[in-house]
Amino acid sequence: MTQPNYVSALDLPQDDDLSVEMRDYLAFYQERFGFTPNVFRAYASDARKMKPFVDMYHALMLEPSNLSELEREMIAVAVSSVNRCYYCLVTHGARVRELSGDPMLGELLMINYRVAELSARHRAMLDFATKVTESPHRVEQGDRDLLSAAGFSDRDIFDMSNVIGFFNMTNRVVSATDMIPNPEYHSMAR
Amino acid sequence: MTQPNYVSALDLPQDDDLSVEMRDYLAFYQERFGFTPNVFRAYASDARKMKPFVDMYHALMLEPSNLSELEREMIAVAVSSVNRCYYCLVTHGARVRELSGDPMLGELLMINYRVAELSARHRAMLDFATKVTESPHRVEQGDRDLLSAAGFSDRDIFDMSNVIGFFNMTNRVVSATDMIPNPEYHSMAR
Amino acid sequence: MTQPNYVSALDLPQDDDLSVEMRDYLAFYQERFGFTPNVFRAYASDARKMKPFVDMYHALMLEPSNLSELEREMIAVAVSSVNRCYYCLVTHGARVRELSGDPMLGELLMINYRVAELSARHRAMLDFATKVTESPHRVEQGDRDLLSAAGFSDRDIFDMSNVIGFFNMTNRVVSATDMIPNPEYHSMAR
Amino acid sequence: MTQPNYVSALDLPQDDDLSVEMRDYLAFYQERFGFTPNVFRAYASDARKMKPFVDMYHALMLEPSNLSELEREMIAVAVSSVNRCYYCLVTHGARVRELSGDPMLGELLMINYRVAELSARHRAMLDFATKVTESPHRVEQGDRDLLSAAGFSDRDIFDMSNVIGFFNMTNRVVSATDMIPNPEYHSMAR
Amino acid sequence: MTQPNYVSALDLPQDDDLSVEMRDYLAFYQERFGFTPNVFRAYASDARKMKPFVDMYHALMLEPSNLSELEREMIAVAVSSVNRCYYCLVTHGARVRELSGDPMLGELLMINYRVAELSARHRAMLDFATKVTESPHRVEQGDRDLLSAAGFSDRDIFDMSNVIGFFNMTNRVVSATDMIPNPEYHSMAR
Amino acid sequence: MTQPNYVSALDLPQDDDLSVEMRDYLAFYQERFGFTPNVFRAYASDARKMKPFVDMYHALMLEPSNLSELEREMIAVAVSSVNRCYYCLVTHGARVRELSGDPMLGELLMINYRVAELSARHRAMLDFATKVTESPHRVEQGDRDLLSAAGFSDRDIFDMSNVIGFFNMTNRVVSATDMIPNPEYHSMAR
């Protein structure tokens, strides 16, 4: 196997203080999918950090929003493509393939979303995600105006900005600690 | 006043569903400091996102860690310097001045930490934060080894990576929405 | 389908002057694999350019060399990763999966070869390919010395340099004309 | 002499298997110009690679095309300027001076084509060559539309893309092997 | 103190050949402000360089011009922000605060002028200063046209270009020699 | 002629207040060389700026220093190469050819000094000039230590830093105003 065979490069045992809620959360994945995503195993080393991380992930990616779950996953992949984040591209690329039923879409967003045939809405969304990721200090009102023109409300822009921010965070945590995706993701929804 | 006179460029009313805990959180700032930080007012527009954001902030920045609170704030400023994030540099620059009692340290980290006279520990910490922020895909084991050589444990590296990630997130949310710091910060601890 | 449904963005009919040798070349793919790679269909619009392109491809990628065919394909993917070339990453990513029997290796090289567990030989090879691609004017004798230290002869460096150059060419031709990979590649050797 | 006194940094004897055609090709230069361009001497170390390289060079740079030979040489210099390729700028800069009878044009393209007074056609052509060279993944239909608006056909764009690609290849081969231009070029057509 | 406690990293005694004019210049600062700016103390090590440096500073920053003194200081800070120059941001940031009576304006320009609410005139001026600093070779007539449209004459553009140039010079001299601002600047006009 | 036929893009008449000293300076060039360098003609539009500019040029480039005049011109060209400054590369490239008697040295420094065969002293000097120009905020004590190791004193580093700074200034003034070199330079010392 050519990817490192560990959760991350850091040697951190599971935290004994993990709450029942979080232990159940880990067990749920194991039972349902046969494996627990390594990102959660890594956070399980620190009870105080795990709970808000899991809660934020759910709030941003799974709670109701005018942005569909697929759209949020598309942003996840576009952001992670700029940052060349192996963990996030493998896992969220798989999720894009699964949610869209379109294996090519995952590949396109992972490599270069500019090649994809996208709706004006999705193109504006990914242009914004890319600019905010690459050069946040250059973002201005004109960039938000392009989103409004594509039909996004201020609420949608807030949701979008949080998803963009979240993956800029996880991309860094993953790269800083060399978190490695579970091998199961590679073949999903091909 | 030359900075925009709003919480952020998005027009988002406070969420009616905000929990008592979060309402108290906002009130606490108002009472104690005479103003509520705009970042929390912005998140108060979305009850589901506010709670994990506040919880994560506390878990990463205020909970016990081998990294002192000042060290975590130094990382916040160094990361925000790379991203040229106005909100975060103004607010966390103030916090560095306050915690260190050294107004120059805030300026040095805001502009270019390489000019500062830092301990080997702090230099290694800020070099890592800068590299993870600028080019996460180039981070490798050698970078973590430099941290170990400077006395950081794997647990410390995990804590550090989360702080670095967190400010790469908030820098993006702030830039994407043009969040503006409360004017009070500018004159603090000068 | 989210990838454009054409050979390339240019509307160019097949050249009537195509030689029998080149017509047979196209037919061979169709017969053997059920489709003709779009890059060859694109070059078939220009008889004078097609023959040296096909000859060069064979000379560099398939003729005997101390670099194995897999190694040359690994370089192809690493170069195309820097240039974010959709066509080349999809097609040569598939070839890496096929030749290595290791689907993860294709993903690793496509996203970020620094995460992969590679031999010192392969790491030196991909470091060189990446530097020559990103900033050719910074390449110096020290870079070639690293290759020699990893066991590569001057002849090997010549072979390697040509493969690196070739994909910097095709990446540009592909991007300039929006050449699109045949859909068949996506599911190969997963 | 301040430029290295070799064909390239690699020690590679001429290939004994060189065909009569290629031997004659080398001899032609020696006889006609008094020296053989080092790039061909370098490729003469590998019979299998030399022939397609020479054939491609002729197909792209000398065969009939709506792009004049000077225009193709202008592209060669603009691409090599981005990549700061010493060999290609010295040799093709000389060729631009020669074909245009305008020594300044060679200097302008070598340093910064934006300073030159160019026709709209040439400006569009060099803008495209520069973008494809600097950031191929950002090229989109809008870039090709600018070429169409400047009078270029799809066939012309194909020809142009191949010239751009070819010099992105040779720039890398040259830099990777430190190929050095024959001293004779420096004073040509001044 | 976290900033180095020296004029610069170079050990250079004051030049014995300093003219009376320059000695008086140094004394004037000491008497009037209680300290002599370190940049002048550094240049006092070289009589031949000090006089034209002081003269140029006065000619560009203090002599009559359609650009107000504040506008020239705003350019100084915007240029120094791109170059992350600690000395120049601390000293000219203080001067912007002083001349504008607006402490926030200094912070905004130091960190990211795009966040500030600026007149069209000032925005055009700082956009130009930033582009000339970041990528001088990309500046073209269109950039000067934007200045003309914002009401700047050719004379104004000449004045502006000289101020931009001057701080690109001092930023480099300062960084190359690690010149350190006198501590007094930090608390000025807060 | 493919370079613009003007002193600069700005329409600025000669200043009536020009001193006799400066008028004589202009006349000297005309008489001695048959033309007046456009940079001085441009500054002649502003008497207050011309004198310190000329004085600084002389102080840095012509006054005694441990850096030979050729070495200072080599720095001028290396800095201008990073900034792709047409005016400065044409004029100071000519001066390097003239002072060195080596036409190739001018070309090498203009395109990529890393290809040239340079003494350790000159290589260290140009590495420093390039780093200070490209990324001044990354310069640290280690960079100055490399200069010391190559035999440069603190005084030499001060001289060098001023030359590097000066050309970062003139490169910007030239690019901001589109100053064009007198055609006579192109054929000098070929």
Image (cartoon, coloured by chain):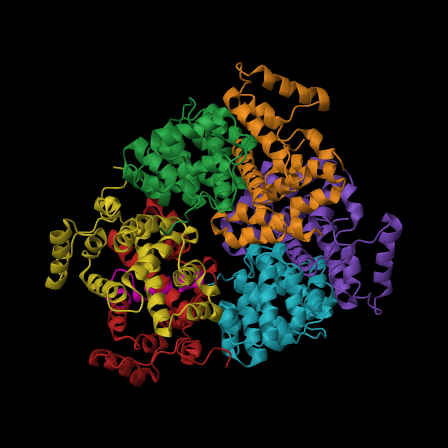
Chain colours: A green, B orange, C yellow, D red, E purple, F cyan
Q: Is residue F151 visible?
A: yes
Q: Is residue A123 left or right of residue C6?
A: right
Q: Is residue A112 visible?
A: no
For the residue pair C128 and B145, the one nearer the viewer reads as: B145
Q: How many marks?
A: 0
For the residue pair D103 and B144, the one nearer the viewer reads as: B144
**Residue D162: x percent and y percent?**
29, 59
For the residue pair D30 and B84, the one nearer the viewer reads as: B84
Vertical placement of residue A120 versus C96, above or below: above
Vertical placement of residue B114 versus B2, above or below: below
Extreme residue toward the front, this view: A16
The quarter holding residue A96 reads top left
Q: Is residue A57 left or right of residue C62?
A: right
**Residue E98: x percent and y percent?**
76, 40
Q: Quadrant of the C terminus of chain B?
A: top right
Q: Is residue D66 magenta?
A: yes
Q: Which residue is painted at 73% across and 57% down in the image?
A: E179
Q: Quadrant of the N terminus of chain B?
A: top right
The quarter holding residue D120 reads bottom left
The quarter holding residue E118 reads top right
Q: Is residue A67 magenta?
A: no
**Residue B184: x percent and y percent?**
71, 29
Vertical placement of residue A90 versus F74, above or below: above
Magenta stretch bounds = D59-83
State the predominant SS element of the stretch in magenta.
helix
Q: Which residue is painted at 53% across and 26% down in the image?
A: B52
**Residue B188: x percent and y percent?**
74, 33
Q: Which residue is painted at 71% across and 71% down in the image?
A: F153
